[in-house]
Image: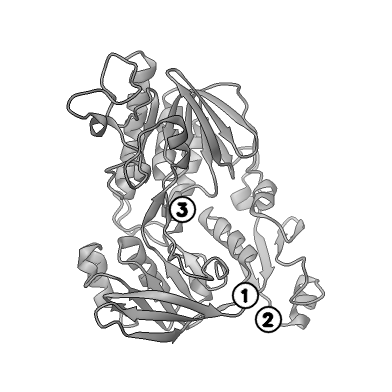
Amino acid sequence: MNDAVDTTTALKAKLYGTRGSPEAYAIRDFLHRCDIFFEWVELTSDAQARSEAGTSGLHDPRLPICQFSDGTRLEHPTVRQIAEKLGWLRTPSRTEYDLAIYGGGPAGLSAAVYGASEGLRTVLVERFALGGQASTSPRIENYLGFPRGISGGELAERAREQADRFGTEILLLRTGVRGEFTPGRGVGHLDDGTRLVARASVCATGVSYRRLGLPDEERFLGAGVYYGAGASEAELCGKAGVFVVGGGNSAVQAALHLAKYAASVTIVIRGASLKESSSEYLIARVSRTPNVKVMPCSEVVALDGGELLHTITLRDNQTGKEWVEETNWLFLCLGGVPHTDWASEVGIVRDAGGYLVTGPDLIADRDRPPGWTLNRQPYYLETNIPGVFAAGDVRHGAIKRVASAVGEGAMAIALVHRYLNGG
C-alpha cells in the first residue's frame, strides 16, 4: 500500500504455527484478505518445530513465527506488526481533509476512488483489512464485469490500488472511537490517538457477523470456530466434516468453496429452505454438489472440546431432538451487526437494529429530523447531521450486495460535492 515499495509482489511470507492457534489464524486471515501470498506450515511435533521453525517445541511462546523472503523473522507477531513490515502503516499527512471515510469495504473503497479522483483530499480509515466482509468471500460470481467471478480479496486489492493511485491516504488497523460533527467540520478520534479533521464524512463501517451467543464461543475462535466464509481456512480442512451456519448467499458460497477440500459440508439453517434467503444460482449449485447437504429447521446449541473444538450439539427445532456431531470446523455466517455505537453519542439517528438512518427515511410527517439546521431536506445518503453521509451495509434499508455498496459509495461522493458547494 505504498507506491515506493510494491510489497505484494516483493515479499512473500512463510507462517509457522500450531493448529488451533487464534494468533496464527488472525495472521492467516489478514494476509489472505489482503491478497498476500504466504505459505502456512502447520507444526505437529516438537522435532518439526525445532528443525523447521527454530523453536524449542510446539509450546514455545515465540510461536507463531512469520518468516519473510527478505530474511526478516517476526516471533509471535501481532497483525499490526505484520502490516508494519509490509509498509502499510502510515500517519496522516494533513491537518485537515475534504473527506474522511470510515470503513474500507466496497462502499468505503468506492467512495475513496471517486472522492480522490474528483479532487477531494481524501483519507480512509479501516479497522482491519480492506474489503470488509466481501474480502472473506472466496469468489463473488454475480458482480458485474467478472463473468468467471473474483475473490473478495482480489477485488479489494484492485480497489485499493485505484484509491491509492488517485491519492487517497489509507489508515489501516485503526478504529474510530469518538466523533464530533458540526456543519462543515467533523473531527474523528481514532483508537491510537490520531485526530482527523474533515469538511465531510462518509460512514461505511459495515457490519460484523453475529455470534451464536454460546458458552466457550470466544474460546474456540480461531480454534474451530470461524466467522465468515473462512477462505483462509478452506485448504486446511483436510477431508474433514465441516459445518456452516447460515442461509444467506455468503454462507452458501462458503459451503461450496469448502466442499472442494472437505469430506462433507453441512449447511445448518433455521428456516425450512435455502429459498428463503439465498440466490437461485447458488441453490442450484448446492443441489449438484454431492458432499454438501442442507439441515433445515435446525441450530447449533452447544460447543465442546479442549484446546480445539471437538463437538457441536445440534437441535431440530421442529421436534426438539438434540444430538452431537464431531467436527473441528464450524463457520458462522449469521448476518450482520452494524458498527454504529459511536453514532448515538453524537446524536446520529439509528433504527432499532442500530443501522444509520438517512435521507427520506429521516422525514416524519414532512418535518425535518432532530437537530437539522439547514434550509433543505437531507440528501438521500445524508444522516441527520449535515455533511455526514452513510453508505453500504451500515445504512438503514441498504441492499446487501457488493454492487449496491459500490454504487452507494459513488453516489455519496456526488452528494458530498453538492454539500461542499453549498447545496
Which badge, 1 or 3, comes first in the chain's sequence?
1
- Name the residue beneath numbered marker 3: 154
Which badge, 2 or 3, comes first in the chain's sequence?
2
Q: Which percent across, then down, holds residue 167?
A: 52, 30
Estimate the spatial distance between the alpha carbons at disc 2 and disc 1, rounded to whole Å: 8 Å
Which amino acid is tagged 2?
Thr
Which amino acid is tagged 1?
Arg
Q: Quadrant of the N terminus?
A: top right
* Mark 1, secondary structure of its residue: loop
Q: Which percent across, then down, holds residue 155?
A: 43, 50
Which badge, 2 or 1, comes first in the chain's sequence?
1
Which amino acid is tagged 3?
Glu
Q: Would residue 9 be visible to someone looking at this image? A: yes
Estimate how packed mark 2 is, as few (under 14), some (14 to 19) or many (20 or more) residues with alpha carbons within 10 Å: few
* Mark 3, secondary structure of its residue: helix
Estimate the spatial distance between the alpha carbons at disc 2 and disc 3, rounded to whole Å: 31 Å
- Name the residue beneath numbered marker 2: 44
- Name the residue beneath numbered marker 1: 19
* Mark 2, secondary structure of its residue: loop
Task: Choose top left, top right, bottom left or bottom right for residue 69.
Answer: bottom right
